[in-house]
Amino acid sequence: MRRTGYLHDMRYLLHDTGPYHPEMPERLIAIHNGIKDGGLLEHLTIIPASRAEQKWIETIHDKSYIRKFEEVCLSGHSTFEDHDNGICIDTYETAFLAVGGILETIDMVMGGKIDNAFCAVRPPGHHAEVNKAMGFCYFNNVAIAARYLQMRWGIQRVGIIDFDVHHGNGTQHIFETDPTVFYYSIHEHPSFAYPGTGREFEIGAVEGRGFTKNSPVLPGQGDDIYKMLIEKDLIPFFEKFEPEVIIVSSGFDAHEDDEMADINVSTECFSWIMETIMQLGDKYSKGRVISVLEGGYCIPRLPELAKNHVAILLNF
Amino acid sequence: MFVSRSMVKEVITVDKDLSVFEAHDKMKANKIRHLPVVDDKNNLIGIVTDRDIRSAMPFSLLKGGQNEEEKAKIADLKVKDIMTQNPMTISPMYTIQDALLMIQKEKVGAFPVVDSEGKLTGILSVRDLLRAFINVLGINEPGTLIGILAEQKVGQLKKIVDAITEENISIGSILVSRYWEPDKRGVFAYLLTNNVMRIKKKLQSLGYTLLDPMEWYLDQLPKS
């Protein structure tokens, strides 16, 4: 069994997106119940949230953007920058706790206290751009994590794998010209699904050309295409890149029962994806795989998906 | 939607007495395929395309070969010898729709834009039309496409737009297209949101069929 950390904190429920919003606090409750009822809790190192120092958020986001986000939250608005982005007065602090918890988790992995981790955070992050909140995301959690690994822990090459059904435009754009961070994403084809980026020809630019890889999947497709594309697009690129740490943008919204998109990935295939990522982690990254929650909106399916995900991290 | 708003205004032009070699270099340097030919008063007198040049030059020279004999043979060749004289032009007051239909009809890659006095004021290529079309589709902004099958009768689009508006969703574009069944229309709404769960359910409860994404075509009839 591996030593797996589980970033879990009830304060992540404080971010209230408003009525009828799919990115709801109940998601985390469902995830926690799945892990708990699966009998996994006792094997996990539970990591409570901690508040991030703003200087780490500033490695990705502009100060003026952070300030604006704070002002809009504290002044009681119900959305930030876009109607999609439901907020409440606690959203700003919760976003700091999400980043802080992930950075704390990184310290534990890099300090050798745990091998890998699942960070069950809200709000999600992969759509957030340097200067713009998008698609329920405010701070780009995984982008900040990648920079933190490099600046605090001297890691040279970070590999990001994003299997959320939506393309992580923010993460891609942040590292587009950077050959030290490889961004791989598999998602529903951008002609049909949000946010409209992540096309096959987006492969990075300038020095970062060849360090971004996208696998768009047409609506209605499922396991076979996912497995084929991951074997064809992800594995060979990571074999060449040899990431020292792997960060996973884990979204469960490609599930066949998730109504946010039109992709039909089965519960078993989600396990296959995670097992494949773990193999890459063992081979190149000393098992250092840090999974960070993004989307996934089918409340009845989240418990089992989360339980399987964590069991694979644990090698249970 | 006028040509004057979408055309390239700073046109790269050539003189009719320029050598074909130099015209070719100018195209390569600027990554363009059409060079309007103007006189000293900026009156349009012709156009030369990369295809005209390719037809005039032996393959080996195009590829940068150093065959001196072949080179000498066409060294004297001027733009005026290969250009199309009095090419088809459009006016800056043409609409984008005019230009789209004309480009399809005439099978050319670009139109010089001339004013009423025959002066060159711009050039509009397929590339510029594509850019205009991308703007019309709204796909430069993040959003989700949904396809809705609607009866062809008055008021259908209003019901759809009302439902979208009630959900507080901004619209990037709505395209209405023909459908296989004659009394139906495909409505393609590009919605500027990540959250289409509720609007999809709402449309279904209003009696609309959502089109299977894999069966989606912007043009539902066979090409004529």
Image (tube, rainbow, N blue to C red):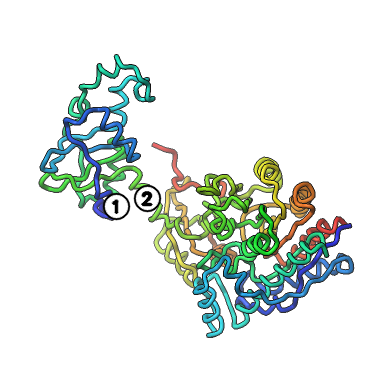
Residue A130, above or below B219: below
Distance from Cα at disc 1 to Cα at disc 2: 8 Å
Left/right of residue A219 with respect to residue A256 in the rendered view = left
User: Which residue carries the number 1 mark?
Assistant: B6
Q: Is residue B146 visible?
A: no
Give the amino acid at mark 2: Arg
- Of residues A181 and B34, which is closer to you in this image? A181
Callout 2: SS = helix
Question: Residue A301, how many percent across, how many down?
Answer: 75, 62
Please give left or right for residue A165 compared with residue B154 in the image: right
Tell me the quadrant of the picture where the C terminus of chain A can be found: bottom right
| Image x and y of residue A124, in percent | 64, 67
Report which quarter residue A200 is drawn in: top right
Q: Position of residue A11 (x, y in %)?
A: 71, 79
- Subunit bearing disc 2: B
Residue at image point 67% right, 59% down: A249
CB atoms at circles 1 and 2 under 8 Å apart?
yes
The residue closer to the viewer here, A273 or A132, is A132
- Marks 1 & 2 on one chain: yes
The disc placed on residue A295 is none
Label 2, on which residue? B131
Residue farthest toward the top in the current orientation of the protein:
B69
For image coordinates 71% across by 55% down, the residue present is A246
Rendered image quadrant of residue B12: top left
Place of residue B34 in the rendered image (x, y in percent of width and height, measured from the top left): 28, 37
Q: Is residue B147 above or below residue B68?
A: below
Q: What type is the residue that disc 1 sits on? A: Ser
Q: Residues within 10 Å of mark 2 (few under 14, many from 20)?
A: few
Q: In the figure, is residue A312 to the left or right of B184?
A: right
x 60%, y 57%: residue: A166
Of A14 and B88, the residue lying toward us: A14
